[in-house]
Amino acid sequence: MTEINEKLAAKVEAVKQVLVDVVADYDSATLASSYGAEDMVLMDLINKFAPGIEIFTLDTGRLPKETYDVMQEAKLRYETEVMVYFPDATDVGDYVTNNGPNAFYDSVELRKECCGIRKVKPLKRALEGKKAWLTGMRRSQAVTRNELPVSEYDETFGLQKFSPLTDWSNGDVWAYIKAFDVPYNKLHDQGVASIGCAPCTRAITAGEDIRAGRWWWENPESKECGLHVKASKI
């Protein structure tokens, strides 16, 4: 086994146990992957310890080239088939016709409508029939996630939700990626910490919050796309 420090090894073992328990307790579980650094760590761990967990991604139609590059690299590296879900073309067409292709810059409401079409609706399709879903979210990523538990019931989508890396630091994530030569999105090398759609993602500067580069024109409290917001807030 590749050499990693004792602290990280303990965290890997804890995630392994979560994954094994998910497979044992839920007959249909899936990882939502955006191909960011955290999701690549989970993809690697699922392939090693819990291949019974499915993996899917949401192709919004506006992803950066680098995201497609790592998608292809991961496909060649891992045996797990990743299901790809796209937004409804009519919904996208109506939004662009009525508001313009970049209307999400104009207001939080229009941005959330765009996210709803390109991400939330496809997510609902991806989660149909599933008993549990997993995410790469961590507490230290944003103020909207600072009380994130490992496991919670997702009232919005009606299934159990797991965030196995919730107590991992950014350093833990990258130590794992480097130790095990895990494929990763090369936008991270350009200072992009959190990667979403190309027009809604930018690099961050020293001292900025990890998610400062997502929807940077909005206040931090509003910066979720609808995938990870409590039911009462959607």
Image: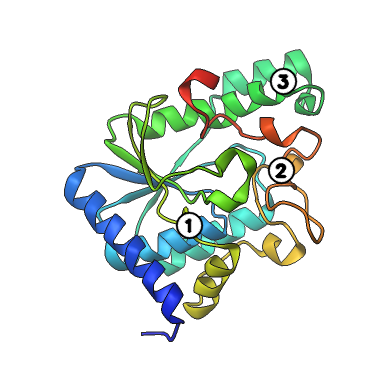
Q: Position of residue 14 (x, y in %)?
A: 33, 63
> Residue at image x 39%, y 34%?
126
User: Relative to 5, is 105 above or below?
Assistant: above
Image quadrant holding the C terminus, namely: top right
Q: Which mark is residue 167?
A: 1
Amino acid residing under circle 3: Leu
Q: Which residue is the site of mark 3?
A: 110
Q: Earlier in the sequence, mark 1 or mark 2?
A: 1
Q: Report the side of 134 relative to 107 (left or right).
A: left
Amino acid residing under circle 2: Arg
Q: Earlier in the sequence, mark 3 or mark 1?
A: 3
> Residue at image x 29%, y 56%?
19
Q: Position of residue 147 (x, y in %)?
A: 51, 42
Q: Which residue is the site of mark 2?
A: 214
Q: Nearer the viewer, residue 119 or 161?
A: 161
Query: Outermost residue, front direction?
Result: 147
